[in-house]
Amino acid sequence: MNSHKVVRDVSFFFCRLVPYLVLLCLSFQAKAEVSQPAFWEVRKGDSVLYLMGSMHFGHPDFYPMPKTIEDAFAKADRLVVEVNLLNLSPQAAQIVFKHGGLQQGQTLKDVISPSTYRLLQNHVQKTNVPINAFHRFQPWYVTLLLVETEIRKTELQQQLGVDLYFLKKASGTEKPIDELETLESQLSLFSTFSLKEQERFLRQTLQDLQNGRDYLTKMAEAWRQGNVDVLEQTLIEPFRAQKDSQQLFDRMFTRRNKKMVSAVERYLQKGQRVFLVVGVGHMLGDDGIVSLLQRRGIQVERVLSAAPQKNL
């Protein structure tokens, strides 16, 4: 198991969660205009922090980044990311199996219903992936593997992810890189869901893989154009529409957003110029980083926009 690939997969999973993340597994018809993603400047006194919403799988047409963003990165004293994909623990694969693997003697067929297992069988027959490849893993991790399989059929590439783009730029300089989270902390969130909850995610994913062909084009173009209204509609609003996804949203976004905001406040107190890159879903909505900072009386200004947006 390749540790670098594992962590990148997990990061993507955090940004595009079931049942909606699977809709990203479609082809992206990029336009020729220069990418102008949403970007914010946070100020408190003389301290400045830049907020960049990432897509963890990218497309060549995401680049080059606008000069405003590149200049902000160049001026920053340090880069802050969710997890440093370039500095992984040698134990990463073991950590993944600790949280994503099944107990000794169990198989996937033992922990999900026969009807869900049949759905999985029907799906993998179309992908040329043997179903035995999933037998040792918990349902949440099987969901991730299904998404990765579909992603490989598209033009989206892990090595073109926005966070990885800035990590590579920072690694070629003396700019320090901080992590907000760890692989262990991220994986532990998934493994705390019951097997029944995980099966529900898996089943919804298998159903969603059969439709939603326009979703990725809409979402990826919204990211490139900095259209936060469309991003919120595609990434946040679906959670509000389904009661059984509220707990997932609380664990994956709301709680983590509050911790990220606390980290932002600590950096602002230090007086450093910081460039912070996290999944764009964390920036959006009433419980997103931008709104949470504003409610705490901290100045947050939208720096770059390709089209008129609502004031976040």
Image: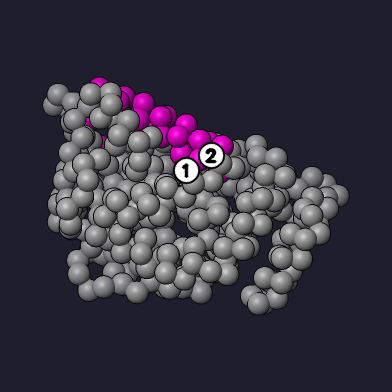
Element under disc 1:
helix
Between 215 and 171, the residue placed more toward the observer is 215
Q: Residue at x 47, y 50 (%)?
A: 238
Q: Amino acid at mark 1?
A: Arg
Of all residues, the one furthest to the right in this rendering is 105
- Identify the magenta region: 245-274
Q: Are marks 1 and 2 in contact (CB under 8 Å)?
A: yes
Between 265 and 109, the residue placed more toward the observer is 109
Q: Which mark is residue 300?
A: none
Examine the rendering and report whether any part of residue 12 can be seen.
yes
Q: Amino acid at mark 2?
A: Gln
Element under disc 2:
helix
Q: Which of the 4 image quarters holds residue 1?
A: bottom right
Examine the rendering and report whether any part of residue 169 can be seen.
no
Q: Which of the 4 image quarters holds residue 29?
A: bottom left
Image location (x, y in percent) of residue 107: 81, 54
Q: Is residue 257 within the magenta segment?
A: yes
User: How far apart, in angstroms, are the residues tagged by discs 1 and 2?
Assistant: 7 Å
**Residue of label 2:** 246
Between 49 and 143, the residue placed more toward the observer is 143
Image location (x, y in percent) of residue 46: 13, 26
Q: Which mark is residue 240?
A: 1
Compared to 296, does 128 lie above or below? below
- Mark 2 Cα-neighbour bin, 10 Å: few <14, some 14–19, many ≥20: some
Q: Is residue 151 left or right of residue 39?
A: right
Q: Residue at x 41, y 29 (%)?
A: 258
Q: Residue at x 81, y 59 (%)?
A: 114
Between 189 and 311, the residue placed more toward the observer is 311
Q: Is residue 11 left or right of residue 35?
A: right
Q: Which of the 4 image quarters holds residue 243?
A: top right
Image location (x, y in percent) of residue 133: 72, 64
Name which of mark 1 and mark 2 comes first in the sequence: 1
